Amino acid sequence: EILLTQSPGTLSLSPGDRATLPCRASQSISGNYLAWYQQKPGQAPRLLIYAASNRATGIPDRFSGSGSGTDFSLTISRLEPEDFAVYYCQQYGSASWTFGQGTKVEIK
Amino acid sequence: EVQLLQSGGGLVPRGGSLRLSCEASGFTFNTFAMSWVRQAPGKGLEWVSAITSSGSYQYYADSVKGRFTISRDNSKNTLFLQMDSLRAEDTAVYFCAKFPRGVIHSFDYWGQGTLVAVSS
């Protein structure tokens, strides 16, 4: 099973800042099947990025994904007030899906 | 508009059973694979189970294999999760989630979640 590590667990930033959230896999992810989700308290997760770098429908272009193999990242170019939330990476491989433990982006 | 409306959660004793439902609308249900993901209180997301569009193939996390059964009724646009031999560590909010068309690498729509609490 591929493990995903998201570090740091918390990022303290200000509105307008650039946020870079890393996600490292314990082994190479086939097909770069790495996705990113945003979750706010009491809500279901929302798909932001799929297959490492493709924005999901309706996602603003300030969100971008990059990376390949074992190292991936989500970048938010300029934080808006509504972007403060928890972000999870998720991988797929061999009929198994795993999530990272999440990074909370909080207001500094 | 895609909607996934969940029902069936609640409080259940350890060793008990519960069935979750997820009624889909806004898309052609019988052409999409579906899945269940859970989140323990204050914790991260954990994939639980997945099923192909026809229902022919099912997949389970090791933590629930042999105790949970995923199924679907394409005539009623509904996904199910039968949970037996429940343990305290199964306490979580359970989300149903839809895969995009033709692929199973990410979850593009989610239900609202339903809480399952297993009492000791």
Image: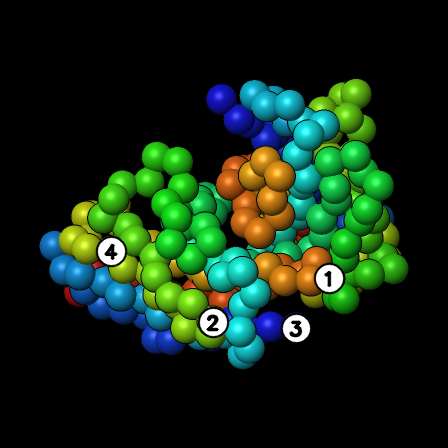
> Residue at (14%, 60%) from the top-left corner?
A17
Q: Chain of mark 4?
A: A
CA–CA distance between discs 4 and 1? 32 Å
What numbered label is drawn on residue B61? 1
Say if labels 3 and 4 share a chain: yes
Residue at mark 4: A76
- Are the residues at dot 3 and dot 2 in contact (C-beta closer than 8 Å)? no
Where residue B53 appears, as percent x and y from the top left, is 73, 36
At label 2, the amino acid type is: Gly
Q: Chain of mark 3?
A: A
- Are the residues at dot 3 and dot 4 in contact (C-beta closer than 8 Å)? no
Give the SS element for disc 1. Answer: loop
> Residue at (23%, 48%) from the top-left corner?
A62
Instruction: Identify whether A67 is placed above or below A43.
Output: below
Front disc: 3 or 2: 2
The crowding category of the residue bearing disc 1, from other C-alpha atoms within 10 Å (few below 14, some 14 to 19, many at least 20), is some
What numbered label is drawn on residue A69? 2
Classify the position of the C terminus of chain B by image quarter: bottom right
Residue at mark 3: A1
> Residue at (44%, 46%) from the top-left corner?
A47
Disc with the residue nearer the chain's start (3 vs 2): 3
At label 1, the amino acid type is: Ala
Give the SS element for disc 2. Answer: loop
- Residue B114 as seen in the image, left or right of residue A82: right
The crowding category of the residue bearing disc 2, from other C-alpha atoms within 10 Å (few below 14, some 14 to 19, many at least 20), is some
Where residue B68 appears, as percent x and y from the top left, is 82, 53
Q: What is the count of numbered marks?
A: 4
